[in-house]
């Protein structure tokens, strides 16, 4: 399996990990967002309602509506999901400030208002990788 396919498979498994994560349910009770996650040349559009990933679109078109996007090259996501991640790749907020290839765009106010729930959701990529 290529690295891109492995990492995209982690995003595809997020709904299952999010549904089982009690911490995310508590933190994300008011977390509603459409999040585009881009890894290299592939993207997934996650719809989050009340802290639960209710859908994952594997083929978002150019006209797909999203609130904010988290994008970067495969090498960056590989570092982020590694255990343990290297410095500056341990958190999306650190990456936003210190990793130039990390693109965090769109309505980042929604992301900031739900920072703890978003952080927990994205951390679940590591849990998915640990069980891959």
Image (spheres, rainbow, N blue to C red):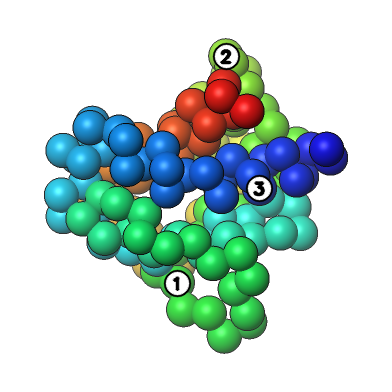
Horizontal side of 108 relative to 64 (left or right) equals: left
Q: Which circle's residue, 2 or 1, is located before the other in the chain?
A: 1
Mark 3 to mark 1 CA distance (whole Å): 18 Å
Q: Position of residue 21 (x, y in %)?
A: 30, 33
**Residue at label 1?**
66
Horizontal side of 128 relative to 79 (left or right) equals: left
Q: Taking the image as drawn, is residue 13 in sight? A: yes
Q: Determine the secondary structure under disc 2.
A: loop
Q: Choose between 91 and 7: the one closer to the eye.
A: 7
Mark 3 to mark 2 CA distance (whole Å): 19 Å
**Residue at label 3?**
8
Q: State whether residue 128 is above or below residue 67.
A: above
Q: State whether residue 87 is above or below residue 12.
A: above
Question: Which residue is depicted at the point 71% across and 59% down?
Answer: 42
Q: Determine the secondary structure under disc 3.
A: helix
Question: Which residue is depicted at the point 45% across and 72% down?
Answer: 66
Question: Which quadrant of the figure has residue 129?
Answer: top right
Q: State whether residue 34 is above or below residue 26.
A: below
Quadrant location, the C terminus: top right
Question: Which residue is depicted at the point 15% across and 49% down?
Answer: 29
**Residue at label 2?**
84
Quadrant location, the N terminus: top right
Are there few (<14), some (14-19), or many (20+) residues within 10 Å of tag 2?
Answer: few
Q: Are marks 2 and 1 in contact (CB under 8 Å)?
A: no
Q: Position of residue 88 (x, y in %)?
A: 56, 26
């Amino acid at each position: 399996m290529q690295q891109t396919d492995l990492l995209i498979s982690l995003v595809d498994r997020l709904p299952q990990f999010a549904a089982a994560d009690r911490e995310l349910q508590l933190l994300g009770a008011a977390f509603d967002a459409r999040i585009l996650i881009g890894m290299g040349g592939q993207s997934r559009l996650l719809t989050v309602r009340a802290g639960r990933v209710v859908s994952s679109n594997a083929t978002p078109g150019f006209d797909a509506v999203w609130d904010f996007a988290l994008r970067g090259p495969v090498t960056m996501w590989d570092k982020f999901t590694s255990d343990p991640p290297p410095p500056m790749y341990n958190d999306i907020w650190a990456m936003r400030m210190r990793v130039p290839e990390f693109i965090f765009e769109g309505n980042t106010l929604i992301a900031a208002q739900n920072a703890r729930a978003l952080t927990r959701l994205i951390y679940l990529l590591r849990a998915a990788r640990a069980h891959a």
